[in-house]
Image: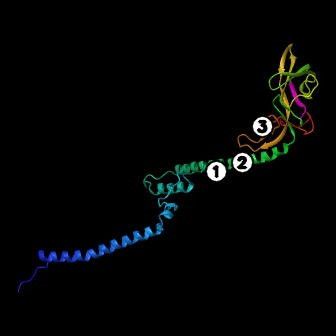
Amino acid sequence: MSLINPLSSAGAQSIAGQTQTSVAPAQQATSSAAEAATTQSTADTTTGNPFIDSIRLPEESSIPEPNSQELTQEDFFSLLSQQLSMQDPFKPVDNDQMISQMASFSTVDGIKNLNDEIVNLNSVMTSSQALQASGLVGQKVLIPSDTGYISAEDPSINGIISTPEAIDTITVRVEDDKGQLVKSFTIDGSAGGNIDVSWDGLGANGEPVASGNYSIKASGRIDGSSEELPVSTYAHVTSVSLGTASTGSILNLRGVGGIKLGDVLAVAESGGGNKPIVDAET
């Protein structure tokens, strides 16, 4: 009677055969499960209609969006806690150094919040300035320009001539937009300072001039020589543009264009010629 050694080659081949036979069904089951999952995934993403599948919106990507590179206060304290936990127990972080780091971060965070508040404040001030400027619609404002506009609504031009000292006689010249002389006349400048000037819109022949822009030039003798004098004119405000925080509100003037609210020298009565009721400098 002979015994069969279970570790012999014949026994090993028998065991290997049985192992392969038992593994093969497991691999087939796993492969079937994977194919079933793939089929289910395909069924979930397709409708069976090629046209509908082509116009469907793409699915959201599972790739997470990159985190913000901004270091927040929570990130700072997390790094600080990590630094304290990893410090050398024989060389601990100095308290003054840690407090300095916390103070520096608090300062930076405070400056950022202050900048945000300043931006919000600029927006509020711009809106408030536009609301105040809207009250100037229909009024006349004094602007640092010698050009005025003649029209049926405003048949005359009024302004102010600034003199450094008292001048007996000031010569006023009215020129059209091409620089041609339309009319000239003289006014008394013995009072000195700001001298009112008004042109009725009539040419040298006494006839009303055409609508358009006209410039008022003034000159006088100072210390024995003739000098040009600065002239400011009144313009009618037709509307107000909001503008931006850097430019401020813009006043749209009839026939002249736009001007910043901060450049207005004075505000006059809507029906009055050169009678200022508000001085912008005060």
Q: Which residue is mark 2?
A: 123
Say whether residue 247 is left or right of residue 220: left
Q: Would you call the spot at circle 2 few (<14 residues within 10 Å), some (14-19), or many (20 or more)?
A: some
Q: Earlier in the sequence, mark 1 or mark 3?
A: 1
Based on the picture, tell me whether residue 159 belongs to the magenta stretch: yes
In this orientation, which residue lies closer to the viewer: 39 or 121? 39
Which residue position holds label 3? 258
Above or below for 131 versus 226: below
**Span shown in magenta:** 154-162
Query: What kind of residue is marked 1?
Result: Asn
How far is the residue under mark 2 from the one under mark 3?
21 Å
Q: CA distance from mark 1 to mark 2?
A: 16 Å
Secondary structure under tag 3 reads strand
Callout 3 crowding tier (Cα within 10 Å): few <14, some 14–19, many ≥20 = some
Q: Are discs 1 and 2 less than 8 Å apart at CB?
A: no
Image quadrant in which you'd find residue 275: top right
For the residues carrying marks 1 and 2, which lies nearer the camera in this image? 2
Circle count: 3
Q: Is residue 12 left or right of residue 146?
A: left
**Dot 1 crowding, Cα within 10 Å, few <14, some 14–19, many 20+:** few
Q: Position of residue 62 (x, y in %)?
A: 47, 61
Tell which of 240 and 133 is nearer to you: 240
Give the residue type that dot 2 points to: Ser
Looking at the rendered image, the quarter that the C terminus falls into is top right
Can residue 8 be seen by looking at this rendering? no
Three-letter residue code for mark 3 = Gly
Callout 2: helix, strand or loop? helix
Which residue in the protein does label 1 denote? 113
